Amino acid sequence: MKLNDMRIRQLKHAGSPRGEKYADGDGMYLHVTATGKYWRFSYRFAGKQKTLALGVYPDVTLAKARDRRGDARALLADGTDPGVAKREAKLARAEAASNDFASVAAAWMAKTDETRRAITSAKLKRWLAVDINPHIGKMPISTIKPLDVLERVLRRMEARNALDSAARAKALIGQIFRYAVAVGLVERDVTADLRGAIATRKKVHHAAITDPELLGGLLRAIHGWPAHPTVRAALKLSPLLFVRPGELRTAEWAEVDLDGALWTIPAIKTKMNRDLLVPLSTQAVAILREQHALTGHAQYVFPSIRAGGLPMSDGTLNAALRSMGYDSSVHVAHGFRATARTIMEEVMGESPDLIEHQLGHIVQGPLGRTYNRTTHLPARVKMMQRWADYLDGLREGAVAPVAA
């Protein structure tokens, strides 16, 4: 006689040391003991009698127990021992739980730490700690779906208008998933399905002064500005070297050869992920020697004034320019690159290829091969000295030369 809900509720332990069994058919029965009511499924596999636990009543209802019995019978029909299948599923769940996103992210961070700058690691750790792990960190990485990343992480960042950080967080999550693919924890990178799913900030060109006469005024303002010596040195070098502001403020003394008049920016710090050689004019070397007397004992050429051990913050140079009357609509620190690119070619008549090489852009030869980092280095050394001399002339009020 099959069981029903009313009968199950009425059943009580009758006092037998081993409890009482009430059959429901097809091998399933309810085992009533002094401690509770337990669903069991009795079956034979490979000639042996076995028992499978289906759950505890009332947490597992009669209907749910019957569903589990059906699943077990289906496994038997396919030649699979349901007891073994249950243990394997339990182990798989335990393994998945131990490989939650936060744990995998920590493993990836540790494995790749040596290839990153300390400041980059700090940013990645902050995104993980603030924006990512609180929302998906405890989820087994194998269970995370594209919608989890989008709704739990990226939409939250998007809502507070942190669009650039949201894009970087998505890229970071993608790197962690690709690591998980490599070590066999997941099948694919789920962030690949999120292309175009979040808003992007409209690209704005960096404001830059490209008129020689106005540039002369800016140079005079920089040299006469009563700033902190480290900030003033960085500002003086900005037009001379026209590297990206992030490359300049994170420059390390170990990268600078003052005697050889050359600064080698390692690939890990450049946008194109290639070493960039920056010839130092006599003016640049003089500025750096003065700075070395101040910070030569430290790691960074331009250390943070407030935070020991860290480089100058990314807003320092623009803040300095604003204090001199040059706001973001007129000229920004990144704008020195456009300043140099325009005036060197259009006014001084310098080779566009040489300028592009010095800007760190990818330049290909006639046969389509990308030039290496030392291509035209002697010519670039001379060009950088001509540029420094030209800037001195502008600052001192000389008439800007016109290209022939």
Image: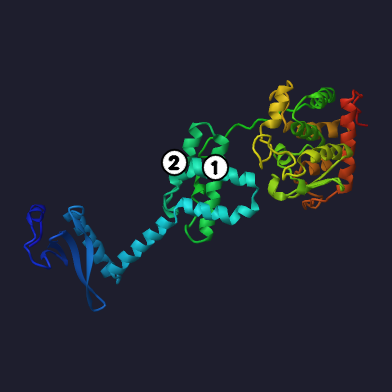
Q: Can residue 68 be seen here?
A: yes
Residue placed most toward the observer, 325 or 153: 325
In the rendered view, tell whether residue 380 sits above or below residue 402: below
Location of residue 141 in the rendering, given as x and y in whole percent from the top left corner: 45, 53
**Residue 353 sits in quarter:** top right
Location of residue 232 in the rendering, given as x and y in whole percent from the top left corner: 77, 31
Q: Residue at x 69, y 46 (%)?
A: 269
Labels 2 and 1 touching (C-beta < 8 A): no
Residue placed most toward the observer, 2 or 389: 389
Dot 2, crowdedness within 10 Å: few (<14), some or many (≥20)?
A: some
Q: Can residue 276 be seen here?
A: no
Res. 152 mark = 2
Q: Residue at x 81, y 50 (%)?
A: 365
Residue placed most toward the observer, 14 or 239: 14
Location of residue 91 in the rendering, given as x and y in whole percent from the top left corner: 36, 63
Q: Is residue 157 left or right of residue 249?
A: left
Distance from the alpha carbon under mark 2 to that under mark 1: 17 Å
Q: Secondary structure at mark 1?
A: helix
* Quarter occupied by the C terminus: top right
Task: Work out which residue is located at the far bottom of the displayed protein and give it.
Answer: 47
* Quarter occupied by the N terminus: bottom left
The amino acid on which the numbered mark 1 sits, given as a three-letter code, is Arg
Residue placed most toward the observer, 220 or 350: 220
Q: Residue at x 40, y 56 (%)?
A: 97
Rendered image coloring scheme: rainbow
Location of residue 19 in the rendering, given as x and y in whole percent from the top left corner: 11, 65
The amino acid on which the numbered mark 2 sits, given as a three-letter code, is Arg
Indicate which disc, 2 or 1, sits on the residue closer to the N terminus. 1
Dot 1, crowdedness within 10 Å: few (<14), some or many (≥20)?
A: few
Task: Work out which residue is located at the far right of the displayed protein and give it.
Answer: 404
In the rendered view, tell whether residue 123 sits above or below residue 394: below
The residue singled out by tag 1 in the image is: 126
